[in-house]
Amino acid sequence: MVGPFDFIPVAEATGLIVPIGEWVMKTSIRQLAEWSRSFQDHGQLTMAINVSVGQLRSDRIVEVLRDEIASAGIDPGRITIEITESMVVTEDTGVVSRLRKISDLGVQLAIDDFGTGYASIANLRRLPIDVLKIDRQFVAEASTPGENLLGPIVQIGDAFGLTTVAEGIETVDQLDRLRDLGYQLGQGFLFSRPVGADQARQLLEDQFCASRPQPSVDRRSVQRSTISPSSPRDTGR
């Protein structure tokens, strides 16, 4: 199997990232609609979808999102589009305009791997960002001086009314520290490794429908001052 770090640069260089990204977006929204019907008695599922800057250079992304959301009949607020920090600092007015159009649809916008690029507070004010996803390197360094940055980052999120998500959580100790700091959501191998649609469905069934007790880390509710897994409830593509 070819990993994303191998094929994504090639897809971006050849322009194939645009049709691939569109396929991922359509498939993700349709999958969310299917799971929502199957698990409608267990709360609202959400879906996070990564997009490339190539997709944001065309109005096609806005059209696809609008049409697929309407066809699926789901609340647009249950979809989050994840962008990189480099997209946030861009001076490309077309990209900025499309991000605003996506937000106007009611779709959430998230900055992925926050803290590794050059996004400034001014950029957070300039764009309709809803979620900050903190890069895994800060979580991995939680017991070292890097932990000093985790607190200020969540404070920035609080100041702007943003949801904060910690990436790369691998241990219960990391989870507990992040909860104490005020992070609201988290993702990482502690909750699940990347899985296909069938396995993700099984995770959802285990979470919502199985009669057997669930692991404590998967039962944490989404509350302020707590952290909850963004998988499987928040299933990103």
Image (tube, grey):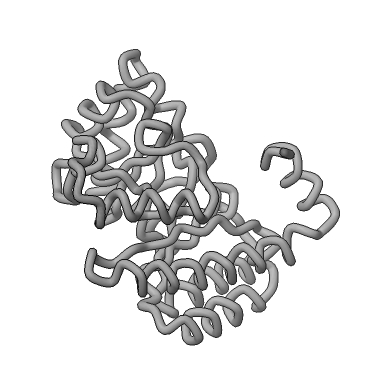
Q: Nearer the viewer, residue 221 or 185?
A: 221
**As drawn, 68 above or below 126:** below
Residue 88 in sight in this render: no
Task: Residue at 69%, 73% (x, y): give it.
Answer: 58
Residue 173 in sight in this render: yes
Q: Nearer the viewer, residue 152 or 147?
A: 147
Q: Is residue 9 left or right of residue 107?
A: right
Q: Is residue 182 left or right of residue 123?
A: left
In percent of width and height, residue 182 lies at 19, 39
Task: Residue at 34%, 48% (x, y): give it.
Answer: 230
Q: Nearer the viewer, residue 34 or 236?
A: 34
In percent of width and height, residue 205 lies at 33, 55
Q: Quadrant of residue 37?
A: bottom left
**As drawn, 158 above or below 15:** above
Task: Residue at 26%, 30% (x, y): give it.
Answer: 175
Task: Residue at 51%, 35% (x, y): give it.
Answer: 116
Q: How many marks?
A: 0
Outermost front residue: 211
Q: Quadrant of residue 105?
A: bottom left
Q: Nearer the viewer, residue 136 or 213?
A: 213
Outermost right residue: 14
Work out which quarter of the rendered image holds the N terminus and state it: top right
In percent of width and height, residue 139 lies at 37, 27
In percent of width and height, residue 229 lies at 30, 44
**As drawn, 62 above or below 165:** below
